[in-house]
Amino acid sequence: MSIRQKNHKEVKISQQRKIVLLVSAWLNTSKDPITGVEQQIKQLWARVHAYFVENGENLNNRSQISVSSRWQEINREIGKFVGFVTQIENRQQSGMTEESRVILIFISMLNYLTHILTLFILFIFLPD
């Protein structure tokens, strides 16, 4: 494995750890039974950021705004995934195993990503 491949792999692992840390920070902060429901949005993100910084070891180089923006991206993607799951579950097809449902969800996600990638390629390569 080349140095470049190794660095790319380390960056990817670092990004995954940041995502897990951010989700953990949001869950631990927003679901706090004492302050979770009553806190204002600025207080929530200040607490999420503080949790992220305290528990992030060397991953904590993000600002509060950056953490909030990243969470919005993650939340949007989770919403899409939940939409795919709901779509498959609402079909209520008899004889479907859990494995079949997972495969259908995966195929739905791939179709969506293929569509997005096609649009992106068209945008990049087609003249105005």
Image: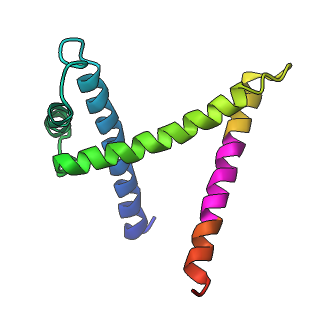
Q: Magenta segment range?
A: 106-117
- In the displayed structure, 73 sits above or below 25; it is below
- Residue 16 appears in the rendering: no
| Quarter occupied by residue 51 | top left
Q: Nearer the viewer, residue 46 or 100?
A: 46
| Quarter occupied by residue 81 | top right
**Chief secondary structure of the magenta portion:** helix
- Residue 8 appears in the rendering: yes
Q: Point out the residue furthest to the bottom here.
A: 127
- In the displayed structure, 64 sits above or below 55; it is below
Screen quadrant of the C terminus:
bottom right
Q: How many marks?
A: 0
Left or right of residue 100: residue 44:
left
Left or right of residue 122: residue 28:
left
Q: Residue at x 35, y 62 (%)?
A: 7
Instruction: Assess whether residue 60 is covered by the magenta stretch.
Output: no
Left or right of residue 83: residue 68:
left
Q: Residue at x 66, y 59 (%)?
A: 115
Q: Point out the residue furthest to the right here.
A: 95
Residue 97 spot, x, y in % from top left: 78, 22
Instruction: Assess whether residue 114 is covered by the magenta stretch.
Output: yes
Left or right of residue 116: residue 11:
left
Q: Residue at x 18, y 34 (%)?
A: 55
Residue 77 spot, x, y in % from top left: 48, 44
Coloring scheme of the render?
Answer: rainbow
| Quarter occupied by residue 88 | top right
Q: Residue at x 15, y 40 (%)?
A: 53
